[in-house]
Image (spheres, rainbow, N blue to C red):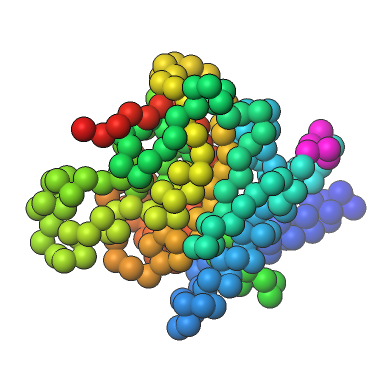
Amino acid sequence: MKKIFLYILAGSVCFSACKKSDDDVNTYVEPADINVQNNYDDQAIKKFMDENYLDVQGNIKPFSATDTADDKEKKLSQLAYKTLPSGTIYIVRDGAQPPAASAQTIKPSDSMRIMLRANSYLATLTDGQGAFNAGATFINTINGNGVPAVDPIFYYISPKNPLIKKATTDAAKQSSYYVINGFSEALQQFKAYDNLPNAAPYNLQGVIIVPSRAAFARNPFYPYNYAGYSNTISLRNRSLVFNFQVYGRVDRP
């Protein structure tokens, strides 16, 4: 009888926790002052960095509450991260960068191949503090086809791209309608490998965390299918977390 009661109690706690998390998202009301959302983002990013670490291949992993195997791992917040003026944070992972002799400088106009996994999150007020909720896959070539993405449109879009050339609104004619500026500026702080083959095993170079103000904030954006991103989820007010490796870059013709 005691066991039955304990199971019921545990189930009730679990249900309440899940319901609370769902309610946090479902009852989310966009703050009238965007600075409030920015504050939520910054708090949520700090919390995320305290609750996650990098495994041996550079994948972002959450700390386990029950497994002691990750107890000696460093939090993302304990690594040598840097913050750009936009609020974008990047972490250059030790031991995962290309050899200095062959490292390639990344320029804004480069054509490149990049292996990556990225999720978007909505920072909401949870228990009096900003926290990431409603996580959604943005792009994932690592667990997808395992092939680096070539010239991802959220990094670079040519003025001659049909999406811009055939755009019917002034907003859609601008590169900022498609490009995630925070990701673009942070990626240029890294070096690219010198043309690794697509089949080369990945060893992720680091992390880029883009708060919503350095992504699309509250600007309109084209519901372009970013290599599998669900068009049913708006990127409005969403922050993005990228885990990646640049396999190669070449000068764009």
Q: Which quadrant of the structure image shows residue 73?
A: top right
Q: Is residue 43 left or right of residue 137?
A: right
Judged from this view, the residue extending furthest toward the bottom is: 32
**Residue stretch rendered in magenta on the structure:** 69-73
Q: Position of residue 190 (x, y in %)?
A: 51, 39
Residue drawn at x 58%, y 29% is 97
Between 88 and 66, the residue placed more toward the observer is 88
Where 113 sits versus 136, above or below?
above
The answer to if 131 sits in the magenta stretch is no
Q: Residue 236: horizontal and vertical position, in percent?
A: 39, 65
Q: Is residue 119 visible?
A: no
Residue 48 falls in which quadrant of the image? Answer: bottom right
Q: Position of residue 55 (x, y in %)?
A: 68, 33
* Residue 226 in picture, x, y percent from top left: 33, 44
Is 17 rendered above or below residue 61?
Answer: below
Q: How many marks?
A: 0
Task: Please state if 185 lies on the left or on the right of 99 as rendered.
Answer: left
Q: Quadrant of the C terminus?
A: top left
Q: Residue at x 37, y 30 (%)?
A: 249
Any part of residue 98 in sight: yes
